[in-house]
Image (cartoon, rainbow, N blue to C red):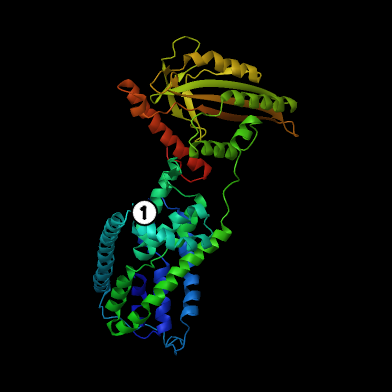
Amino acid sequence: TEAPLLIRPYLADMTLSEIHVVMTGGYATIAGSLLGAYISFGIDAASLIAASVMAAPCALALSKLVYPEVEESKFRSEEGVKLTYGDAQNLLEAASSGAALSVKVVTNIAANLIAFLAVLDFINAALSWLGNMVDIQGLSFQLICSYILRPVAFLMGVAWEDCSVVAELLGMKLFLNEFVAYQGLSEYKQRRLAGTEEWVGSKKQWISVRAEILTTFALCGFANFSSIGIMLGGLTSMAPQRKSDFSQIVLRALCTGACVSLVNACVAGILYMPRGPAVDCVSLLNTTLNSSSFEVYQCCHQAFQRKVRHYVSIIRVCNGNNKIFEKLTDNGTELSVKVSLLEIYNEELFDLLNPSSDVSERLQMFDDPCNKRRVIIKGLEEITVHNKDEVYQILETEAAKRTAAATLMNAYSSLPYSVLSVTIHMKETTGDGEELVKTGKLNLVDLAGSENSGRSGAVGKRAREAGNINQSLLTLGKVITALVERAPHVPY
């Protein structure tokens, strides 16, 4: 509704087909002011921008198919599109008039948004009451939409198990507004990133990344029944004499605008490529660790998504390390392999390879000034190893130093994280006789035992420990998800 302000002088002379194009374009796109709001919800910014760009030509094409031009347009010649001077005498008066005119548009949007949110609550309350009368629990507007629009979601290319959720969001967008629908999509995405169980009872808690992307395209538009009043109010305030013409085609333009978003979602479904193939976590860690870092990240991501309580054993990783030693030795290069082992307990760092029996001395961590992707831990002991058996021996010897305690749920529960870091330095000679030193580092994390405080009977110090563990696990899940999806920002 803001865009027609730019063509306000032409509205009075437009043909019905041209007005239909204007309305369809408005329904098929979102306002730039709302783009930032949706991104702040956590919606994928690239998908929102792509959907907005794709909507313009698609809206023009579909609009002309639905409502072809049958009148003589006044804007075919250069003379027809020339603008006359406005009534404003100077820049300040023009700015003031424009601001006053935009107040009506903004007021219409705000009033309709508040009103239709209230209508949604009323409809859900009424449906819930009617459902309880006939013993149908949880009956709501969203539930009805999830059944009616499920075939539409499936035709977009959404997997069938996600269609009910996507159909629910499409219904919210069509009958309420896209703002509410994007809020709902954001909640599903946040639950996925937090590692929530996929199903709780009979309700799906999150949808796949592909379904999120396609839903973002399908929701990217102003086409909803609540916007009919906004569209009519905005255009009528600029061209009151065309009110009957606007009313005649507004519903057709609404349906066309909704179809534009769905068509864009279908195109996105054809072009969308997953960011990486699925990785068999067990096979990856049982064979070798010379795979790409991306595959290792995906493996960790699978562990969080599936709520694996028992981490992949570090002993298996040591077997994989043997392959690393063999591979490096076969290359005939000079190398050294060093390992360090620390624990993170109550957000403090402790060195498990400290030669003394007391490991209570806290370590300090600093950013590496030479490499922004790494950190430096002051005073951390590193031991040179020559084969995987020495790594395994270190793990067995230092395991006794780890902090552990018994709870009502487990006789032995590891309270801290432990991080085994393997650093490899390789010296190679290039064809020009120049010596080249390469360094690689692999951090293997053994997660702390996460337990429900109510079930474990944790109180006092143990309850505080459990709170720190759960908070850090949630943060770690978000970090791993950001790495797997190659997000531009890692939330830590």
* Depicted 209 relative to depicted 35: above or below: above
> In the depicted view, which residue is nearer to us: 4 or 245?
245
Q: Is residue 196 left or right of residue 440?
A: left
- Tell me the kind of residue under disc 1: Gln
> In the depicted view, which residue is nearer to us: 426 or 482?
482
On the question of residue 353 being in view, the answer is: no
Q: Where is residue 83 in the image (x, y as percent from the top left)?
A: 37, 82
Residue drawn at 35 percent across, 61 percent down: 33
Q: Quadrant of residue 322?
A: top right
Q: In this view, does 251 lie to the left or right of 376?
A: left
User: Which quarter shows the N terminus?
Assistant: bottom left
> How many discs mark residues in the rendered view?
1
Residue drawn at 29 percent across, 66 percent down: 109
Residue situated furthest top in the rendering: 357
Residue of label 1: 183
Q: Position of residue 210 (x, y in %)?
A: 52, 53
Mark 1 residue crowding within 10 angstroms, few (<14) / some (14–19) / many (20+): some
What element does badge 1 sit on? Answer: helix
On the question of residue 43 being in view, the answer is: yes
Residue drawn at 41 percent across, 32 percent down: 472
Residue drawn at 53 percent across, 42 percent down: 484
